[in-house]
Amino acid sequence: NAGVTQTPKFQVLKTGQSMTLQCAQDMNHEYMSWYRQDPGMGLRLIHYSVGAGITDQGEVPNGYNVSRSTTEDFPLRLLSAAPSQTSVYFCASSTRAGGNTGELFFGEGSRLTVL
Amino acid sequence: GNSVTQMEGPVTLSEEAFLTINCTYTATGYPSLFWYVQYPGEGLQLLLKATKADDKGSNKGFEATYRKETTSFHLEKGSVQVSDSAVYFCALSPRAGRRALTFGSGTRLQVQP
């Protein structure tokens, strides 16, 4: 019953450092996405993918990079961390139909602090 | 563009009280509407959904009706429990274009025994 697994759960970075948030799902879902959650702002879409080899930008893509080499994995890379990227990050997946209807399965989140 | 507006929290209720969390939306056409719930320390879970006007979504005693005329999707429960304490997010998914969810800012519910 793994579902969507995110690592690490907590991370502290210094400004300018880079890191990768990992996301893996074992449900053979085509659609995967990354959101960030900030107080009073709900969740905002960073990047998404509708299948292996296909990615696209969401609402707030600047400072982040993604790739989708396999169906299971969708890592999110912070190229040069900034304090404005302090947030809780959620990975989500769904079937292709679920992506159209909004039925997403979420990981438990990764809390990132940039000093 | 698309947007979702929720009532600000926290909402504090006593056990067995009636719950309403307001949600209104702005979207082109007729989006699908959702309520997600986030329990402490966990990711979001789909609570209920409605895909067309006048549809009523329901789950675990919660209900919400898709009201096209008022562009609303208010969440209700007749008798809340302590275990309902969580953050509730209203969201929409458009029928065309990029099929990504637009979330409201979330409403924290605290139920006291």
Image (cartoon, coloured by chain):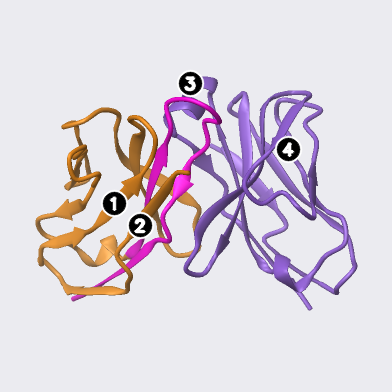
Chain colours: A purple, B orange
The span shown in magenta is B86-113
Real-space Cα separation, disc 4 to disc 1, in angstroms:
32 Å
Q: Are marks 1 and 2 in contact (CB under 8 Å)?
A: yes
Mark toward the viewer: 3 or 4:
3
Res. A74 mark: 4
Q: Please say if the residues under marks 3 and 2 sit with CB atoms less than 8 Å apart.
A: no
Which residue in the protein does label 2 denote?
A: B5
Residue at which label 3 appears = A97
Determine the CA span between mark 4 and mark 2: 30 Å
x%, y% of residue B26?
A: 36, 45
Q: Residue at x 76, y 53 (%)?
A: A62
Q: Earlier in the sequence, mark 1 or mark 2?
A: 2
Q: Please, what secondary structure does the residue beneath circle 1 have? A: strand
Determine the CA span between mark 1 and mark 3: 25 Å
- Give amino acid for label 3: Ala
Quadrant in the picture for residue B12 = bottom left
The answer for which chain carries disc 3 is A
Provide residue A77's location: percent of width, then percent of height: 81, 50
- Closest to the camera, between mark 4 and mark 2, is 2
The residue identified by callout 1 is B24
